[in-house]
Amino acid sequence: MLLDPGMDLTLRPMKYPHFFDRFKDAIKNTWTVEEVDLHSDLADLARLSDAEKHLVSRLVAFFATGDTIVANNLVLNLYQHVNSPEGRLYLSRQLFEEAVHVQFYLNLLDTYVPDLDERAAAFAAVDNIPSIARKAEFCFKWIDSVFELRRLETREHRRAFLLNVICFAACIEGLFFYGAFAYVYFLRSRGVLQGLASGTNWVFRDESMHMAFAFDVVDQVRAEEPDLFDAEMERQVRDMLAEAVECEVQFAGDLLEQGVSGLSLGDMREYLQHVADRRLAALGIDPIYGSKNPFAFMELQDVQELSNFFERRVSAYQMGVSGSVGFDEDF
Ligand SMILES: [Fe+2]
Ligand SMILES: [Fe+2]
């Protein structure tokens, strides 16, 4: 079974070919940081209001460490316990993508924050900015919850690991990052920071696929060991999502503290609740909030992003893309 302890090395016969398909789909989405021109954003940054500048500075401070934390959990926990060589192929690819994201946000901060003291402060946000520190603590709590586990010997071990997988997919990649992307696409809808938005299109797509793979893992374990998914597990997942929403609403309160015209804290809260409900639905769990998506600019996102993807592939590389690309994430 997928969570049996050990290091299965046998690719043939392949036990989980859908994991291998995810790996091949991910390779079709290869991009590099050098393709994204952020310098076009500098003129926009100079003419933002003080409240918008505050939003952007908090946002980049979150991006400074977010993907590094996800990459650490991937290596320390996921790679260790997802016992499938084709699954580990996907995780290797995901680790590469997280590294590209780290490089992208490094480039973003170096470009957006020329002052060296301000830049150092942004990279230290997990220690110095309370709303970002709270999100980091949430992540570390769930990394630590399984960090000591070397082998998933018992039912409780497996449940603890599943909660870690669900946390990073649904709460961190699927909520903290989606929240961050919403600010980027809000700014794009106002005609500013198109460079950041174009890089975000790539990251967004990667994150959607990371989440889809993690949910595949959860579904696979559910098929193999349905008794792990009891009412207690469901309660823990709902509590976890609710705490993640609280963390992200606090962050939104910080970003929007000076009042950004066109983006209210109430709408942001509703959006985050809506996203959390979608994550619960993907896990077969009843919604908590029943909130609607108030952001039309996010509903358009998947369609625009997909067409950009094909255009870029064809125009930039003259490389045909055939078959499905596996974009099945929704909002
Ligand atoms: Fe990432
Ligand atoms: Fe990710």
Image (cartoon, rainbow, N blue to C red):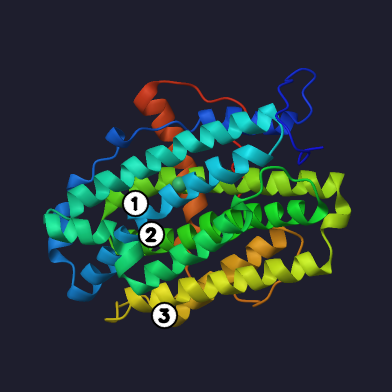
Question: Which structural element holds mark 2?
Answer: helix
Question: Which structural element holds mark 1?
Answer: helix
Is 24 drawn above or below residue 56 in the view shown? Answer: above
Is 218 drawn above or below residue 141 in the view shown? Answer: above
Query: Who comes first in sequence, dot 2 or dot 1?
Result: 2
Separation of residues labelled 2 and 3 (CA atoms): 16 Å
Task: Point out residue 113 in the picture as x, y percentages from the top left corner.
Answer: 17, 55
Query: Who comes first in sequence, dot 2 or dot 3?
Result: 2
113, 46: nearer the viewer: 113
Side of 23 relative to 41 (left or right): right
Q: Is mark 3 within 8 Å of ligand 1?
A: no
Question: Which structural element holds mark 3?
Answer: helix
| Residues at circles 2 and 1 in contact by the CB criterion of under 8 Å | yes
Q: Tell me what residue is drawn at x 54 percent, y 63 percent.
A: 141
Disc marking residue 265:
3
Disc marking residue 197:
1
Separation of residues labelled 2 and 1 (CA atoms): 6 Å
Q: Tell me what residue is drawn at x 45 percent, y 21 percent.
A: 319
| Residues at circles 2 and 3 in contact by the CB criterion of under 8 Å | no
Separation of residues labelled 3 and 1 (CA atoms): 21 Å
Mark 1 Cα within 10 Å, few/some/many (few <14, many 20+)? many
Identify the amino acid type marked 2: Tyr
Pointer 2 residue? 185
Q: Is mark 2 within 8 Å of ligand 1?
A: no
Task: Point out residue 179 in the picture as x, y percentages from the top left corner.
Answer: 46, 64
70, 76: nearer the viewer: 76
**In the picture, residue 331 is in which quadrant?**
bottom right
Is 7 drawn above or below residue 2 in the view shown? Answer: above
**In the picture, residue 240 is in which quadrant?**
bottom right
